[in-house]
Amino acid sequence: MEVISEPSQGIREIRGKFAMPTVSTIIAVYNCADYIAESVESALGQSFRDQEIIVVDGGSTDGTRERLQPYRDRIKFMVQTGKGVANARNEAIRASRGEFIAILDADDKWLPNKLAVQMKYLQSHPEIGLLFGDEYYYDAGGGYRGRWFKDRIPIYTGRVFDKLFENNFIGALTAVIKRECFDRVGLFNEDLFYAEDTEMWLRLARKYPIGYIDEPLAVCRFRPQSRSLSFENHYRTKTRILNSLVEAEADFFRAHPAVRRRGLFNHHYKFGYQYFAVGRMPEARAEFREALRQRPFSPRGALYWLSCYMPPFVVEGIKAAKRMIGGISPL
């Protein structure tokens, strides 16, 4: 298939040429030449075959497009330059034909039965709007760190808007979303260049139940240049998202003030800890102070806020102790 330089024209061509699959797998990629072939191979190698694969390149300059050349007769390829991952995903969704949309990150990979397991689950749970699963993950140095969710994060299913506001526990890498959900809640917010998936999950969870499969379905790799490791940009965007949501869902949060307090506490505490971990104590103090405004009697919030005033050798001792019992987790 020819490179699609004008998405609107390409969308018309795609819809006219291809029959409707069950799943549309979308991959947004930018400068990921070392990993993109393995990612595409993991989609092509699924035991569930009824899918189309749409790859949207965001203007790569590192040879990514050349790495995709051997797959051009088995994928749909589109070009988008400098508009961000939300726009890339939206263009792919608009061009897609599947009943379900599956998201695959360009530097990660799926396990072979990933889609088969999820499609079987969705057949027996038609009420689910979004389904995700666990994943194996590797840190920025390539070291294996275990299961992303089972080993780190509490998971909730069903109507989980309140729990999701308190802490995002849905991974985009394994997410499968019903197409009708996008018709109801809209596409990804293209004004966001970070945390756009968190904002989408919150909108979906307000309207639909969420499902989870308690087994690894994919392999996630954190690279030094990964967007998910840019915690400061992520923090600023997530702050905007939460504040906007509190305003947009004012009736809900008036009726559930504890949800708002827990969500904002977790947000500021988490990023206070990130600043603390890299030695940026003024920023860490500000975040822990904001966390304590939400939950004044939190022992951990108070402990870390006070730690920001301690001598450097004491702070280093605290960091060393944390590393011994689990390390500093990436976002």
Image (tube, rainbow, N blue to C red):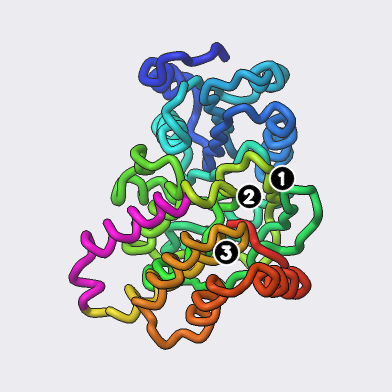
Label drawn at residue 115: 2
Q: Nearer the viewer, residue 14 or 252?
A: 252
Residue 228 horizontal side relative to residue 202, left or right: right
Q: Which residue is mark 1?
A: 47
Q: Amino acid at mark 3?
A: Phe
Residue 18, image x and y in percent?
50, 24
Reading the image, the residue beneath label 3 is 276
| Distance (Cα) linking label 1 and label 2 | 8 Å
* Dot 1 and dot 2 residues touching (CB under 8 Å): yes
250 in magenta = yes
Q: Residue at x 51, y 25 (%)?
A: 58
Label drawn at residue 227 = none
Callout 3: SS: helix
Q: Main secondary structure of the magenta part?
A: helix
Q: Is residue 198 above or below residue 155?
A: above
Q: Position of residue 108 (x, y in %)?
A: 68, 43
